Image: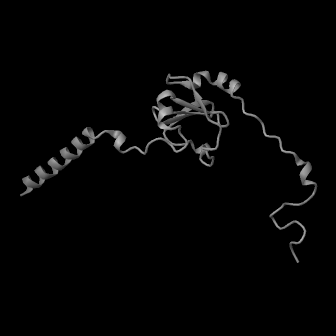
Amino acid sequence: METSKNRIATLFGVLILVFMLVVPTDVFSQGPPPWAPAHGYRAKTRHIYFPDQNMYYDIQRGNYIYFNNGKWSVSVKVPSIFVGINLGKSTQIELDFYGDSPQRYNYSHKTKYKVKKHHHDHKHNKGNGHPGKGHGKGHGK
């Protein structure tokens, strides 16, 4: 009785191992992020550069390359320092680079795709309070 239980357990373990080896890993993947370029572009582009974050996304490998604590790091998930950012609305540059390490040319990328500073014109707010926050005329008592 004990022997048949061992055989069934062994057979079950072998079947799981064979299943894991035979089934391709991309069956379990979730695909590219929603902000990634359409399929036709993926064939021509390997790396997306995000100048606002100074970060790269490797479409082929499905990972992010970013500068963190003085060194380049790689992550399959959006780096925690960028989690609250909508990458779909961030500036994206499709790089004409097909190697494995686009960060080697980071100085050139930062210079070529320099982030433009947004200057806010405060002349229009001449002491009007905070619109929509209950500080303007007509709000209160």
Which of the two residues, 127 or 106, is positioned nearer the viewer here?
A: 127
On the image, which quarter does residue 26 sit in?
top left
Whole-percent x, y for residue 11 in the image: 15, 47
On the image, which quarter does residue 90 sit in?
top right
Q: How many marks?
A: 0
Task: Looking at this view, name the residue that lies furthest to the left.
Answer: 1
Whole-percent x, y for residue 103 in the image: 58, 26
Q: Residue at x 72, y 29 (%)?
A: 114
Locate the C terminus by quadrant: bottom right
On the image, which quarter does residue 73 sit in?
top right
Q: Which residue is drawn at 88% across and 60% down?
A: 129
Locate the N terminus by quadrant: bottom left
In the rendered image of this protein, does residue 130 appear above or below residue 85? Answer: below
Q: Which colour scheme is used?
A: one colour
Q: Which residue is drawn at 36% across and 45% down?
A: 28
Whole-percent x, y for residue 76 in the image: 48, 39
With 91 as the anchor, is 1 left or right in this view?
A: left
Whole-percent x, y for residue 35 in the image: 55, 42
With 31 as the anchor, is 127 left or right in this view?
A: right
Task: Looking at this view, name the residue that lies furthest to the front.
Answer: 40
Q: Which residue is drawn at 89% across and 48% down?
A: 122
Task: Looking at this view, name the residue that lies furthest to the bottom.
Answer: 141
With 39 as the anchor, is 89 left or right in this view?
A: right
Which of the two residues, 44 or 2, is positioned nearer the viewer here?
A: 44
